[in-house]
Image: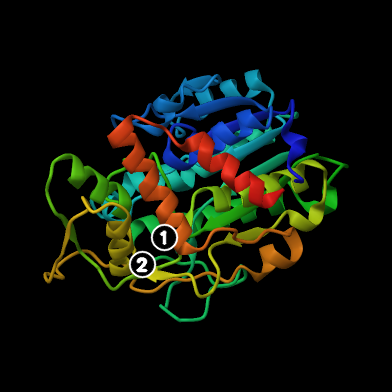
Amino acid sequence: MSISIYQGKKVFITGHTGFKGSWLTYWLRNLGAEVVGYSLAPETSPNHFELLNLDIESHFNNICDLDKLKNVMKESNPDIIFHLAAQPLVRYSYNHPLETFQTNIIGTANVLESARECKSVKAVVVITTDKCYENIEQKKGYIESDKMGGFDPYSSSKGCAELIVSSYKNSFFNLSDFKINHQTLIASARAGNVIGGGDWSLDRLIPDIIKSIEIESKTIIRYPKSTRPWQHVLEPLYGYLLLGEKLYIGDTNFAEAWNFGPGESESLAVEKVLKYSKKIWNRIDFELENNQKHPHEAGLLSLNIQKAKNKLGWEPKWNNKKSISKTIEWYKDFYNSNKINTDLDLKSYMNEIC
């Protein structure tokens, strides 16, 4: 496995209390990294971050507080930065567009500006989303050079975040000046719909059906035919870790944008995800809604991952059935036996990538 470089490295993670951030933090601690987290406090109870009881330095602050962010980053003196902090919800962005733009655009600029003033930083991986593309709902998967866009405020903010990354990379971290005027390489990572145990976020498919089990009610499904590139959270995280390593060792070939998603035939409609989930845990119950008077959400979205496969040596290890199974079993064991399968799932995944 080629991510042993994290042993003893100082890693700064924004959004470490979130779903993906807590999994990434746990993995990095297993790799022997010294992690400093900067994020809002966890918003749900329970939440994955607190359940893991992670031995790290945490700072609970807003990514939009530039002065605080700069100070914390300078004090932590990191080697590598993973920027995951975001307002991540499409429907929330319709009700809170300015907050979404502020967090996802200015927040990203704040991270890069702080990194610019922190001379220890050698690698920055900015995590955006597959929704950063101008989605015309084509069957063909989007490639990294496709047009940025976004119908809704969330998607648009992530497209803008990608432009911020490009601007900072050209203006302040230009590859032609690498090891002359700066020592930092930057890349962005775009992942599909991520699932896995420990997510209790609002307005997401798996967390919604799990929370409905808790209160013994049916989950109302808005867009059952929508097709998404579902993948287990460990899949893109492995891509981020590989990417961070390449940047850290100074390989300029990887200071680019990267897609991380499932195999081409692995995208599934929401309805199929639910039906398979119910086979694993029969307490899952849902109802398909006929009323379509909701804010626009794309019906079809897929990514082309050939670049990551060919250049980075990354490829998905778990198909959609295994990803769904691992996810639902995590919650099933948690609610039935108060068991947390995070370490078990991580070890299982690491066995496949070794």
Type of the residue with mark 1? Ser
Residue at (52% x, 43% y) in the render: 108
What's the coloring here?
rainbow
Residue 162, horizontal then vertical, whole percent = 55, 56
195 relative position to 344: left or right: left
Residue 140, horizontal then vertical, whole percent = 51, 80
Whether residue 101 can be seen here: yes
Furthest residue toward bottom: 139
51 relative position to 77: left or right: left
Type of the residue with mark 2? Phe
User: Residue 149, relative to residue 57: is it above or below?
Assistant: below
134 relative position to 111: left or right: left
Q: Would you call the spot at circle 2 few (<14 residues within 10 Å), some (14-19), or many (20 or more)? A: some
Residue 224, horizontal then vertical, whole percent = 25, 69
User: Residue 100, relative to residue 13: is it above or below?
Assistant: below
Residue ID for mark 2: 151
Q: Would you call the spot at circle 1 few (<14 residues within 10 Å), some (14-19), or many (20 or more)? A: many
Given residues 192 and 137, the one toward you in this image is 192
Residue ID for mark 1: 156
Q: In which quarter of the image is residue 275?
A: bottom left
User: Residue 31, relative to residue 188: is it above or below?
Assistant: above
